[in-house]
Amino acid sequence: MPVLFATLHHLAAFAVVATLAIEVALFRPPFTALQARRLQRIDLMFGLSAALLLIVGLIRVTWTEKGPAYYWHDLFFSIKFTAFIAAALISIYPTAVMLSWTRVLKAGGVPEVAEGCRRRVRMCLMWELTAIVVILPCAALMARGFGYMH
């Protein structure tokens, strides 16, 4: 069972990285209706992948692997988990912007994105990527037993 959950955890993590990279590449206003709809779908897949990653990760921490007493006392797990939660909170803004396009798209229009909004969404996406850069070495260090506080 631990191998199944480890595999699901890694697949979800790769999906998060892939969908975030696609969002960064596609978020280039002015948008066509097709591009805006694609961004909405990609953002949905990003959110679902992140939710799966969190759920499977918490299952691994709680019921498989080394157990919660180990993980909650590991510095790199704490940093990794904090970076993940920060990225999740940061992702709310881009998601809200993309969801706000729904009415315009259903009416056959294209979303208009003000320059300030564009800059804020891009900054959020870059901070999310930065969180991934923090998470990756923490995961490797944590898996090798570094950071465990007895």
Image: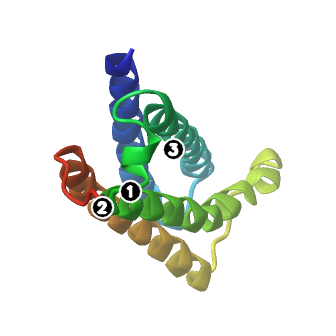
Q: Which of 61 and 123 is in front in this view?
A: 61
The single residue placed furthest to the front in the displayed view is 150
Q: Which residue is drawn at 44% across and 57% down?
A: 81
User: Looking at the picture, how far across and down is residue 89, in whole percent?
Assistant: 59, 65
Residue at x-position 63% and y-position 68% = 93
Mark whose residue sits in front, 3 or 1 = 1
Report which residue position mark 2 lands on: 149
The kind of residue on which mark 2 rests is: Met
x and y percentages locating residue 59 in the rendered image: 51, 32
- Determine which quarter of the picture holds residue 61: top left
Q: In this view, does 84 lie to the left or right of 131?
A: right
The residue that appears at 60% across and 42% down in the rendered structure is 44
Q: Crowding near pointer 1: few (<14 within 10 Å), some, many (20+)?
A: some
Which residue is depicted at the point 49% across and 71% down?
124
Q: Which of 74 and 27 is in front in this view?
A: 74
Mark 3 touches mark 1? (CB < 8 Å): no
Q: Quadrant of the rendered structure where residue 83 is?
A: bottom left
Q: Earlier in the sequence, mark 3 or mark 2?
A: 3
Residue 44, placed above or below residue 146? above
Mark 1, residue position: 73
Q: Give the residue type at disc 1.
A: His
Label placed on residue 109 = none
Residue 20 against residue 15 in the figure, above or below: below
Q: Which of marks 3 and 2 is in front?
A: 2
User: What residue sits right under mark 3 in the picture?
Assistant: 50
Please name the colour scheme applied to the rendered image. Answer: rainbow
Cα distance in 3D space between marks 1 and 2: 5 Å
Quarter of the image that includes the C terminus = bottom left
